[in-house]
Amino acid sequence: MTVVLNQLFTGISIGAVLLLIALGLSLTFGQMGVINMAHGEFIMAGAYTVYVLQQVITGAGWSLLIALPVAFAIAGLMGVLLEFLLIRRLYARPLDTLLVTWGVALILQQVARDVFGAPNVQTRAPEFLTGSVTLFGDLVISSSRLFILALSLVAVAALTVVLKTTSLGRRIRAVVQNRDLAAVSGLATGRVDRLTFFIGSGLAGIAGVALTLIGPIGPTMGTNIIVNAFLVVVVGGIGQLKGTVIVAFVLGILQSMVEYTTTVSVASVIVFVAIVAFLQWRPQGLFTLRTRSLA
Amino acid sequence: MTYLKKPLVGFGIAAVLLFVVAPVALGDFRLNLLAKYLCFAIIAVGIGLAWGRGGMLTLGQGVFFGLGGYAMAMHLKLADAGPGSMPDFMMLYGQLDELPWWWKPFANPIFALAATILLPMFVALLLGLLIFRRRVRGAYFAILSQALCAAFAILLIGQQGTTGGTNGLTDIQGFFGYDLNDPVNRRMIYFIIAGSLLAVLALTWQLNRSRYGELLVAVRDGEERVRFLGYDPANVKLVAYVAAAGMAGLAGALFVPAVGIISPAMIGVVPSIEFVIGVAVGGRASLVGPALGAIAVAWAKTALSEKVPSAWTYFEGLLFILPIVFLPGGLASLAGMIRRRRAVVVDNPPAPVEKTPVEVTT
């Protein structure tokens, strides 16, 4: 029983990381139909933000807390810049955007290599996150994993509140549901796009901060985790957060359960097969916006 | 017959360049490098067919390249080891007492040769059937193809005892009885690769100008319209995807004797997306554009990363950005632009090519 619970929690924490990454992706993908390959490098930027801040601020706890808003702003601004300089020009060609943002990702990786060096760097975890919590008698959970889970849930809650209650959220939902109709209703869709990109990319920065707690920080950290996050978006369906949330946790749990019974390498293949099988049932993802368009 | 003359002249020039000029002008080392580039060109022709003509951005050609490469490398390793014994790396890791069952058929040269092309095509057929029939397309398809690639590379790395893991299958000495250390035999490999590239180009040219080629472009530009005309777009896409997979498999099989190694690092997510740049730079929808683009990009990579490794990555990033943003048709579209401009000046536009209308079956 403990083993199952342990694997379950490992899965949930993998899912929480995926969720943090995929939240921003699903926002930008849902809005513009654009797969932003540089999203992984925005995560990297968030992670390096912690590293840089720790050179200045000695307290690991404070630096982490300060890093959250700073990383959000830095990654968000990078996203806005990307949208403004490149993605805006490629609206009619979503597949080309994918390749162009991959080029941006390569350049950002090399910049990180030139500035911080190719080897991975380490950050100090705050003391209150180094221990572990024991639940149900014998289930040991590391505090940092718990922190990431809480962070991802807070991010989902905050994003939900923004999307459902604010006027910005209303505008974002309008553009996602029907861009043309939103435009003729007098919405400046270009500005909404930029704001969406700011939030979506900023979330990548937050994810980067979270990742410093569980792994090394390096120039290629983005590429390593981004493929699974894309899968979450594809399987979850676009336009609604709940698909992303459910799929992130299901995929995380599936991954950890299969990994436990087989090996990591076999698990990645089994998860892929499961996803293709799932798409036979729901080719547009778990939840979709119902439209009458053919595209 | 004029419509046949121009491509034939083109093929003639390409054949002379590949079979006469290059072997005379280049030393053994450079010729071997060119052989490697030509393998990438073969993959690029397939991507041009699937992406440029069919609109399927496949970010997972590394899987098919790898299947072809590993099939060939497995046979060559077994042949090197001699009958009844195991490849060197299996002895080294010492986890196995005998050859795994799925290695055994590859001892047969005919099975191995067929597998290099048919295995990738079969995998593509299976995946394509499942994906295209359910109308998964666009960015969704691109992401799935990339995820397949990631899973395949992780699988290969994880099964170190039977696949060589991160190292891959290395140190291949012979090629069907020919010693690969002999420069003469390496030249022979180059000629085989050059011939294969020409054959693949001819096949793709024939596909593009056939009725099927028209249909493929139609599916790319208006899938629903083609469906309403009574065709099944899934089948149309499937043919191009499977053909592209077969080409990538062939390229993998030829890559192994030319380079002597195949490893997960050559077929993962990053190399797979790198296969696409040459196609974008050269001109995705044209016939020779992808091949020339792939050769040029591979050459630039060797030349630049020999001198300044970090400069190559910046340059590669810009290669993804600049041509796609500002010249979506690639370098091949430049020729058309110049021709059009000149035609305006001379005020004598070339006669439009007569196209047979596509028959409606319903």
Image: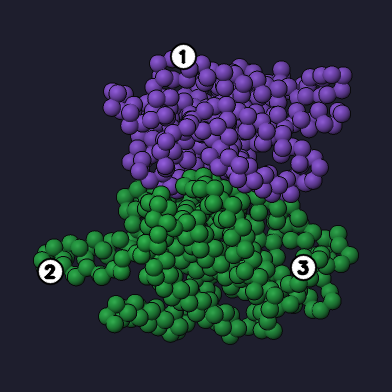
* Percent of width and height locating residue B112: 68, 73
Task: Tell me the amino acid under the disc marked 2.
Answer: Asn
Report if the CB atoms under discs 2 and 1 are less than 8 Å apart: no
The numbered mark at residue B103 is 3
Towards the viewer: B190 or A216: B190
Total tally of numbered discs in the picture: 3
Q: Residue at x 82, y 19 (%)?
A: A134
Up-down: is B160 above or below B256? above
- Mark 2 on the same chain as mark 3: yes
Element assignment for label 2: loop
Q: Quadrant of the N terminus of chain A?
A: top right
Q: Which chain is green?
A: B
Q: Which chain is purple?
A: A
Towards the viewer: B245 or B274: B245
Task: Tell me the amino acid under the disc marked 3.
Answer: Trp
Q: Residue at x 39, y 22 (%)?
A: A171
Element assignment for label 1: helix
Towards the viewer: A160 or B358: B358
For the residues labelled 2 and 1, the Cα–Cα distance comes to 63 Å
Q: Which residue is mark 1?
A: A165
Task: Tell me the amino acid under the disc marked 1.
Answer: Thr
- As drawn, the residue found furthest toward the top would be A165
For the residues labelled 2 and 3, the Cα–Cα distance comes to 63 Å
Q: Residue at x 66, y 31 (%)?
A: A249
Is A226 displayed left or right of B50 in the figure?
right
Q: Tell me the mark number nearer the camera, choosing from 1 and 3.
A: 1
The numbered mark at residue B348 is 2
- As drawn, the residue found furthest toward the front would be B362
Subunit under mark 1: A
Element assignment for label 3: loop
